[in-house]
Image (cartoon, rainbow, N blue to C red):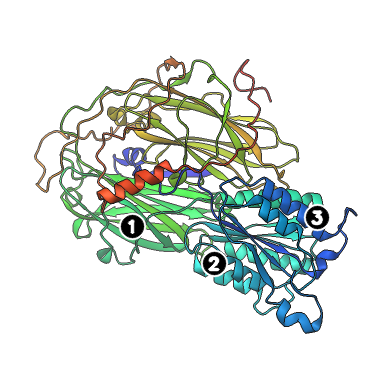
């Protein structure tokens, strides 16, 4: 559960509304993280499996074969095998402890060749886990989210290097490299060693007691390893000293931050500018602590305290995922009634603080986004809306199979109204996006299907606006039965998008004050006791898009002049805190999906963007990676909403 805590001036609600830059996705939609699978083929794998149908190696081959069959066609997966090239005699130890063979380098998976290589493998030698981890890591890219999945039936027999020490070394090479370990009929000592590897790299540990459980666990863990939050951005190093903070221009940046640390960044503002600054911390699954806090404060030129703060809290950080804190500031806009020291053009500094309750030394990636919006000098477009979109009827047609991305940057496009389905695995957070032009709005519901197995965890869904401010969320317990969210039966929705919505008294209406990509996020927590069913949970997302495209606001240019005593061209936040009851929302029939060829009328000021970069971004956006999806979940009955439990 994420609790949101707000403090500051009268602009605070607007800060929550317009927070994040709508950055171009840095990776193709649904792109999968590279994974290196490491398989134990040591002599101990010749022991009989508990089921009596063959050896442990036979069971491992069946599990790997099934895992290979279930891989998306575009998955980037490699395979290494250790212990198959020598015997286990004393004279063979030197060679056996170096015996790690790359069956397939990381790349687009060749399923037939991979299965043939696994089938021909014979178990015979030593267990060089530490050496195999180093070898597998060397096969992966040096940057970006990437994972190793290690299967072993025992502890390392070749140390040094000690596997836990190797895991620490790998973690120091990059916080986005995770090792997930599976213990196949292991004893307590081996289990502790494998768990230590996972813990030191932000990965997960799983037990497999027999062939059937290994088959399920391997597929589940590999599938989960393919989708992670992929932090992206231009590297930047924040400073402890606010007066030495790096000056950044609008765009997306990437830094790292300790559990208890302050990092400072600065931006130059002209008269009339409104600035939006956001920080997203990315936590690995198995984060050392549950409670994480991310705080932003702003100071004006010459260190003036603007008395404006934004702060957010995540109380389930051990499940992994992300936490975003956002801030906006329009103190230089004429008539904004800000304090004198923070109402002039100049260099403004943002202090980002991570306060991880319990301390520690683990650094995590933090995405930073800066957007600068000039004032509106012409028309502001359509009037503000007072009601939200609703479902007049369920979306027509069958379920379209999709594959969600692992982050805002990789959110998968839902082309408009319709029904979309896939599987979400325990511990995953998946992102989708829907394009709304001025005058259009959306509503959606999400159904988590029932699954056998008794898994108990939390589930959550959120809707974010194009600047990544959360419009609304819903969270509840998942007990293995079918649940539709929101649990109150009403869809999560926006009004039709207009610029003047930001003046509304209702917080949810205010957040539909900018056109562009709206993000739907689904999250399923880590199942208690690692008892999650291996096939994940089918989900169905029902989306309705309503309204026709209309004219938006007319932006001008910011200046470096002193503000004149004239009414503000950019609406300021109302001082009232009352929220009038919404009028009945106009029922809508799902509309034709909005086209993806128009961008927001809002001028984005992106540093360093030239024609070559623009063409590269367009080209990358056209390369869409999609897997052959699982069978879509069964569509719920629409005799009434939500479906009967």
Q: Residues within 10 Å of mark 2 (few under 14, many from 20)?
A: many
Q: Name the residue under label 1.
A: 351
Picture quarter with the C terminus: top right
Front: mark 1 or 2: 2
Above or below, 369 relative to 98: above
Which type of secondary structure does the marked residue at label 3 adopt? helix
- Would you say 537 lies left or right of 379 here? right
Residue 483 found in image quarter: top right
Q: Mark 1 or mark 2: which comes first in sequence?
A: 2
Q: Mark 3 points at which residue?
A: 59
Which type of secondary structure does the marked residue at label 1 adopt? strand
Return the x and y of residue 23 as percentages of the image width and height.
36, 45
Return the x and y of residue 404 as percentages of the image width and height.
53, 40
Residue situated in front as seen by the camera: 53 or 456:
53
As drawn, the label of residue 171 is 2
Residue at the (34%, 27%) spot, across then down: 497
Q: Mark 3 or mark 2: which comes first in sequence?
A: 3
């Amino acid at each position: 559960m994420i609790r949101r805590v707000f403090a500051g001036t009268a602009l605070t609600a607007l800060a929550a509304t317009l927070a994040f830059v709508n950055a171009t996705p840095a990776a193709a939609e649904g792109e999968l993280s590279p994974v290196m699978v490491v398989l134990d083929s040591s002599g101990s794998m010749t022991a009989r499996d508990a089921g009596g149908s063959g050896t442990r190696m036979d069971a491992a081959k069946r599990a790997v074969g099934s895992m290979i069959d279930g891989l998306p066609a575009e998955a980037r997966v490699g395979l290494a095998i250790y212990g198959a090239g020598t015997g286990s005699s004393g004279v063979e130890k030197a060679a056996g402890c170096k015996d790690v063979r790359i069956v397939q380098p990381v790349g687009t998976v060749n399923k037939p060749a991979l299965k043939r290589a696994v089938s021909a493998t014979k178990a015979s030698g030593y267990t060089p886990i530490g050496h195999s981890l180093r070898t597998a890591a060397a096969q992966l890219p040096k940057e970006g989210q990437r994972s190793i999945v290690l299967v072993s039936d025992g502890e390392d027999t070749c140390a040094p290097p000690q596997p836990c020490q190797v895991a620490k070394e790998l973690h120091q090479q990059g916080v986005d490299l995770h090792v997930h370990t599976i213990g196949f009929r292991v004893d307590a000592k081996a289990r502790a060693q494998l768990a230590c590897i996972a813990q030191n790299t932000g990965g997960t540990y799983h037990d497999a007691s027999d062939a059937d459980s290994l088959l399920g666990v391997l597929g589940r863990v590999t599938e989960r390893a393919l989708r992670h939050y992929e932090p992206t951005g231009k590297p930047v190093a924040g400073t402890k000293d606010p007066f030495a903070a790096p000056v950044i221009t609008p765009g997306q940046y990437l830094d790292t931050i300790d559990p208890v640390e302050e990092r400072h960044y600065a931006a130059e503002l002209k008269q009339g500018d409104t600035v939006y600054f956001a920080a997203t911390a990315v936590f690995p699954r198995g984060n050392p602590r549950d409670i994480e806090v991310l705080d932003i404060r702003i100071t004006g030129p010459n260190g003036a305290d603007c008395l404006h703060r934004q702060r957010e809290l995540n109380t389930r950080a051990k499940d992994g995922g992300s936490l975003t804190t956002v801030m906006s500031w329009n103190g230089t806009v004429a008539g904004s009634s800000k304090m004198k020291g923070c109402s002039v053009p100049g260099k403004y500094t943002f202090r980002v603080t991570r306060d991880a309750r319990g301390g520690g030394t683990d650094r995590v990636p933090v995405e930073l986004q800066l957007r600068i919006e000039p004032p509106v000098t012409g028309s502001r477009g359509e009037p503000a809306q007072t009601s939200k979109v609703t479902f007049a009827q369920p979306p027509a047609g069958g379920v379209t199979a999709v594959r969600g991305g692992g982050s805002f940057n990789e959110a998968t496009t839902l082309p408009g109204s319709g029904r979309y389905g896939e599987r979400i695995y325990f511990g995953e957070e998946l992102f989708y996006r829907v394009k709304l032009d001025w005058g259009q709005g959306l509503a959606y519901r999400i159904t988590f299907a029932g699954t056998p197995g008794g898994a108990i965890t939390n589930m959550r869904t959120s809707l974010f606006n194009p600047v990544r401010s959360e419009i609304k969320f819903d969270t509840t317990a998942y007990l293995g039965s079918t649940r539709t969210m929101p649990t109150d039966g009403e869809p999560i929705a926006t009004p039709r998008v207009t610029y003047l919505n930001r003046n509304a008294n209702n917080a949810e209406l205010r957040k539909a004050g900018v056109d562009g990509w709206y993000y739907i996020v689904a999250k399923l927590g880590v199942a208690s006791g690692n008892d999650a069913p291996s096939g994940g949970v089918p989900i169905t997302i029902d989306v309705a898009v309503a309204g026709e495209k209309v004219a938006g606001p007319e932006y001008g240019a910011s200046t470096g002049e002193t503000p004149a005593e004239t009414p503000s061209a950019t609406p300021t936040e109302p001082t009232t805190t009352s929220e009038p009851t919404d009028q009945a929302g106009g029922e809508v029939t799902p509309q034709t999906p909005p086209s993806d060829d128009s961008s927001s009328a809002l001028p984005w000021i992106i540093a360093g963007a030239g024609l070559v970069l623009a063409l590269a971004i367009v080209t990358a956006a056209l390369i869409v990676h999609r897997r052959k999806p699982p069978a879509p979940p069964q569509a719920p009955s629409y005799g009434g909403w939500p479906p009967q439990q």
